[in-house]
Amino acid sequence: MNNGLVNAIIAYIMWGVLPLYWKLFNDVPAGEILSHRVVWSFVFMGIFVAVQRRWGDMKRIAASRSLLLSLTASGLLIAANWLIFIWAVNNDHVVETSLGYYLNPLVNVLLAVVFLREKPNRGQWLAIAIAGAAVLIIAIDYGRFPWISISLAATFGLYGLAKKKIGQDASVGLLSETAVVLPVALGYWIYLAAVGKTTAWTLPVSTFVELLLSGVVTALPLLFFARAAARMALSTLGFVQYIGPTIMLLLSVFVFKESVSPVLLIGFALIWTALVVYATASVRGTKLAKAR
């Protein structure tokens, strides 16, 4: 349990400080950053899987058409999530990324209802209703729909649902997912070179080396998270996951100096309330189930 908790804390701290890393490449378009992230994640995970001597697992995946289709879907979902996140960070919308990941567990509940036929209890429905009211308030304050937050929550929620159904572990799964979108990333590189719009290759050597490390930056928190999920209760892991968006929110205010209106703070307060209600209802539901 303690080992799992340490791994979870490390994973969510890494995810929380990730905006600091993507800000290093402010002058590189989000699509180009994404292509590098995919390529170097594939390279890093290929080396990692080779060291583990798990190429047999990759062969079994390649031989299964249904598994390949599922991994293609999850690969496209996580690539979309990465693209939205990178674009949002580099266009000064870190507050909205934070909100998106606060909403994520509540989106997971809705997905479980729709796709897994799970039945939330009254407290969990109340939490969803409070979160919905918060999103409405924030949308009215923005004067527009908070598409960044909703898109991040939806894509990561659907990605988690796909991963649950696929059942592959973090290392083999991430290598497979990056492999299916690798041709798109390489094709985009070729396109940028053809039209003379390549930016990343003109970066200073030190900055380009930092971009090369995007594979490590992407893979490490996922690997720590996989170790945590295997060693600790899901309810406990749910509490720990709020470390990430909380760090993002603090960075947006104190480091990136993004403006946070009083109405937005009210919206966040409602989200936090919804999370407390949801966590309390989930713990009580688990205790009642065990008592039976």
Image (cartoon, helix red, strand yellow):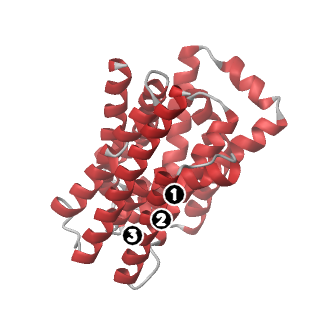
The spot of residue 205 in percent (x, y) is 32, 46
Q: CA distance from mark 2 to mark 3?
A: 9 Å
Kind of residue at badge 2? Ala
Closer to viewer: mark 2 or mark 3:
2
Q: Residue at x 64, y 52 (%)?
A: 113
Which residue is more in the foreground, 287 or 137? 287
Secondary structure category for the residue under label 3:
helix
Q: Earlier in the sequence, mark 2 or mark 3?
A: 2
Q: Which quarter of the figure has residue 235?
A: top left
Q: CA distance from mark 1 to mark 3?
A: 14 Å
Q: Are marks 1 and 2 in contact (CB under 8 Å)?
A: yes
Kind of residue at badge 1? Trp
The spot of residue 278 in percent (x, y) is 42, 50
Q: Which residue is mark 3?
A: 134
Q: Which mark is residue 148?
A: none
The spot of residue 41 in percent (x, y) is 51, 38
Give the side of residue 61 with respect to residue 238, left or right: right
Q: Which residue is mark 2?
A: 129
Give the side of residue 262 with respect to residue 14, left or right: left
Q: Residue at x 49, y 23 (%)?
A: 230
Secondary structure category for the residue under label 1:
helix
Q: Residue furthest front?
A: 292
Secondary structure category for the residue under label 2:
helix
The answer to whether residue 29 shows anywhere in this view is no
Q: Which quarter of the figure has residue 236?
A: top left
Q: Earlier in the sequence, mark 1 or mark 3?
A: 1
Which residue is more in the foreground, 107 or 146? 107
Q: Are marks 2 and 3 in contact (CB under 8 Å)?
A: no
Q: CA distance from mark 1 to mark 2?
A: 6 Å
Residue 187 drawn above or below residue 288: below
Kind of residue at badge 3? Ala
